Image (cartoon, rainbow, N blue to C red):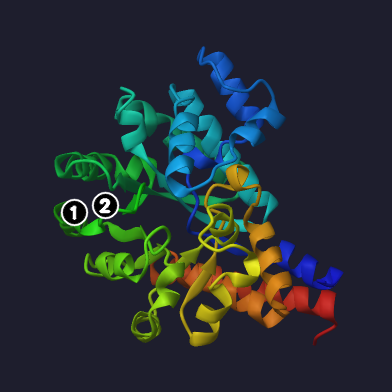
Amino acid sequence: MLTSELRAFIQNIPKAELHCHLEGSIQPATLLKLALSNSIELPFENEAGARNFFEFKNLNQFIDILSFTASTLKTANDFETVTVELGADAARQKITYREVFLSYDAHQRRGIPWHIVNEGIARGRKIAQEKYNVEMWFIADIDRTTEKEVSLNMVELAHASRHDVGIIGIGMDSKEAGNPASRHKAAFERAKELGFRLVAHAGEDVGPESVWDALSMGIERIDHGVRAIEENKLVQHLVDIQIPLTICPVSNIQLKVFPTMAQHSIKQLMDAGVFVTINSDDPPMFGADVVENYLQVAETFNLIAADIEKLARNSFKAAFMDDVKSSKYLKEFTEKVAQLRTELFNEV
């Protein structure tokens, strides 16, 4: 049982989030409004129905549901709305910096022009900074099931408007089984040429071989990576190179990667010395935001304040910031943690 002091510490400690999907972060109430305004028929009529709709049995089914949810976004105002809501949600959780996945492939297939997505996110990102003091950047995600030419085109689109939208990196998601990251090597090489930071989902639906494959692409962070625990050689390699894992614990349980939180690999990875961060993935769809992910991990594995501090500090250290900005965030982090320790634990 977590103490009230540790709960308050988790709620109020500054955080960065590095693994959160724009399309998977649409709240049920907003989803209903978007569908109504865009004349889209939903298979549910209220927020409770939306939560039932979000129930799924595996990763592939979840991705299909996510694609349907994304279909409610049609106008620049729609993209602005969900981006601003991400800022408000971050402020509520004391997330001061957020890197968000953008799956343009899902919108391109529906015929939504890139400039529409671009315009809405650019406006929403600015409002989130001004209204909530939340800094947001975006990672354009390659759908690993698409053709190589499509992923290359997406990299070029991202490059053409990277400053307007705040696109900082290129990533990869979607159905992992049967779709190795290395299929899109040319797109990742082009992204690196253009100065993008590189990440990839791996080690979630597929085991260590998927993580090794992603690492061969020169990525700088692994999104998930939790099944690396299945191979000692890989775990040691992750420790040696200190590549961050952006783990989403509740998501992994909901998607049946592990049967229960107690069987999750996160504590084993932490104890082994792997660089671990905690994130939410698709909060409304999994019924757990970043704070709830911290709380569940802390309670399950009897974490103490020092563990929480390290995890939260890791989130800033793993972010794609330059040294000056990183130093600023870490200084603010250290000062706030000292204040919280004094207020909550009477530490001097």
* Residue 14 drawn at (x, y percent): 64, 65
* Residue 58 drawn at (x, y percent): 49, 48
The N terminus is located in which quarter? bottom right
- Residue at image x 58%, y 58%? 253
Residue at numbered disc 1: 183
- Residue at image x 61%, y 21%? 33
Q: Which mark is residue 179?
A: 2
The one of 304 and 190 positioned closer to us in this rendering: 304
Compared with 171, 52 (above or below) is above
**Residue 229 appears left or right of 192:** right
The one of 23 and 262 positioned closer to us in this rendering: 262
**Residue 76 appears left or right of 308:** left
Compared with 303, 216 (above or below) is above
Compared with 58, 118 (above or below) is above
Q: Are marks 2 and 1 in contact (CB under 8 Å)?
A: yes
- Residue at image x 81%, y 85%? 347
The C terminus is located in which quarter? bottom right
Element at label 1: helix
Residue 51 is drawn in which quadrant?
top right
Number of residues whose C-alpha sits closer than 10 Å to that of mark 1, classed few (under 14), some (14–19) or many (20 or more): some
Number of residues whose C-alpha sits closer than 10 Å to that of mark 2, classed few (under 14), some (14–19) or many (20 or more): some
Q: Which mark is residue 260?
A: none
Question: Tag 2: residue type?
Answer: Asn
Marks 2 and 1: which is nearer the front? 2
Question: Tag 1: residue type?
Answer: Arg
Residue 333 is drawn in which quadrant?
bottom right
Residue 339 visible here? yes
Residue 67 is drawn in which quadrant?
top left
* Residue 148 drawn at (x, y percent): 16, 45
Element at label 2: loop
Residue 320 visible here? no
* Residue 155 drawn at (x, y percent): 23, 45
